[in-house]
Image: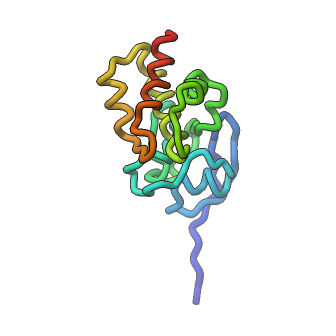
Amino acid sequence: MKTYTNNQEITLKVNGEDYNVVVKPNETLLNVIREKIEMTGPKPGCENGDCGACTVLVNGTPIKSCMSLAVDMENKAITTVEGLKDTEIQEAFIDKEGYQCGYCTSGFIVKAYSLLDKYEKPDEDTVEEWLSSNLCRCTGYEGIERAVNKVIENR
């Protein structure tokens, strides 16, 4: 039996650093980040784009990395929650207890960071709309909303 391989080497820029990785054409960005680059911030949740635990920024736009092919991300700036270390929103999540089990937290932090980057002082409806693309099964969203509102109030 013949084995065919279409693997290719690509360079991904993650959190400002270049990573040369060999990927299959069907590998998701989520799997490559977690398994080949060994950053575990983006989480595999539903793996069909519903929960948002895998959210990362690509050129500043939040995407669900479980729904994106790694080969399509070459020459794009990818930011994971690890790249948002010590940001105001991360500190607010800690201060306002915007987490419980923590599984969804990285996706929410990335999404909230992008929201606050796009809008200086988003209104309540905008915050709710942006956060609605991510799911949390533990907190009921109150701590998450308090964290986002803390950053808005400090502006």
Q: Quadrant of residue 6?
A: bottom right
- Quick one: 130 or 3, which is closer to the camera? 130
How many labels were placed on the picture?
Answer: 0
Q: Where is residue 38 in the image (x, y as percent from the top left)?
A: 68, 52
Q: Which residue is drawn at 58% across and 25% down?
A: 95
Left or right: 117, with 88 as reference point: left
Vertical order, 52 against 92 (above or below): below
Vertical order, 121 against 46 (above or below): above
Q: Where is residue 73 in the image (x, y as percent from the top left)?
A: 53, 46
- Quick one: 152 or 59, which is closer to the camera? 152
- Quick one: 96 or 75, which is closer to the camera? 96
Farthest top residue in view: 155
Vertical order, 131 against 70 (above or below): above
Farthest left residue in view: 125
Q: Which residue is drawn at 59% across and 37% down?
A: 81
Q: Where is residue 57 in the image (x, y as percent from the top left)?
A: 51, 36
Q: Where is residue 136 in the image (x, y as percent from the top left)?
A: 43, 44
Can you say which quadrant of the picture contains the N terminus? Answer: bottom right
- Quick one: 55 or 92, which is closer to the camera? 92
Farthest bottom residue in view: 1
